[in-house]
Image (spheres, rainbow, N blue to C red):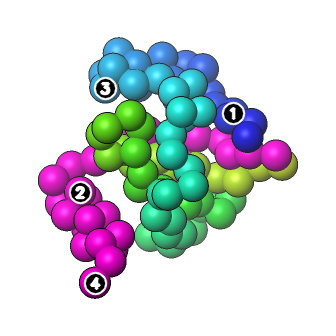
Amino acid sequence: MKIDYDLKKSNKNKRERDLSFEQAIDFDWETALYIEDVRKLYPERRFVAMGYLEDRLHVICFTPIKGGVRVISFRKANSREVKRYEAKTIIK
């Protein structure tokens, strides 16, 4: 999958969160939970994915592009998001 992003924004994310957008290639896109971000009227469709990078849950905001995604934001999930992810992925 193609991963596209703004280099300046990725560098800022790396400084502030120790996470570059380039690392999204290793994000587990197959097991992630997806929701469309409709909080505001954006110029493009945006989605939020919660999934794993190594053994830690992360959150990526992205927009689909031909052959992949354009990363808008990328960070570690907070405790509330971890609970939400676990509640939706546990088989009952």
Disc ID at residue 82: 2
Q: Given contact means CB atoms under 8 Å apart, are the residues at marks 2 and 4 in contact?
A: no
Q: Mark 1 highlights which residue?
A: 4
Q: Nearer the viewer, mark 2 or mark 3?
A: 2
Position of the N terminus, as image quadrant, is: top right
**Residue interval drawn in magenta:** 67-92
Q: Quadrant of residue 83?
A: bottom left
82 in the magenta segment: yes
Q: Mark 4 highlights which residue?
A: 92
Q: Which amino acid does label 4 sit on?
A: Lys
Q: Which residue is drawn at 39% across and 25% down?
A: 19
* Mark toward the start of the polypeptide (3 vs 4): 3
Q: Is residue 76 visible?
A: no
Position of the C terminus, as image quadrant, is: bottom left
Q: Nearer the viewer, mark 2 or mark 4?
A: 4
- In the rendered image, residue 49, in percent from the top left (x then y), is placed at 48, 56
Q: Nearer the viewer, mark 2 or mark 1?
A: 2
Q: Residues within 10 Å of mark 3 (few under 14, many from 20)?
A: few
Q: Nearer the viewer, mark 4 or mark 1?
A: 4
Residue positioned most to the right: 66
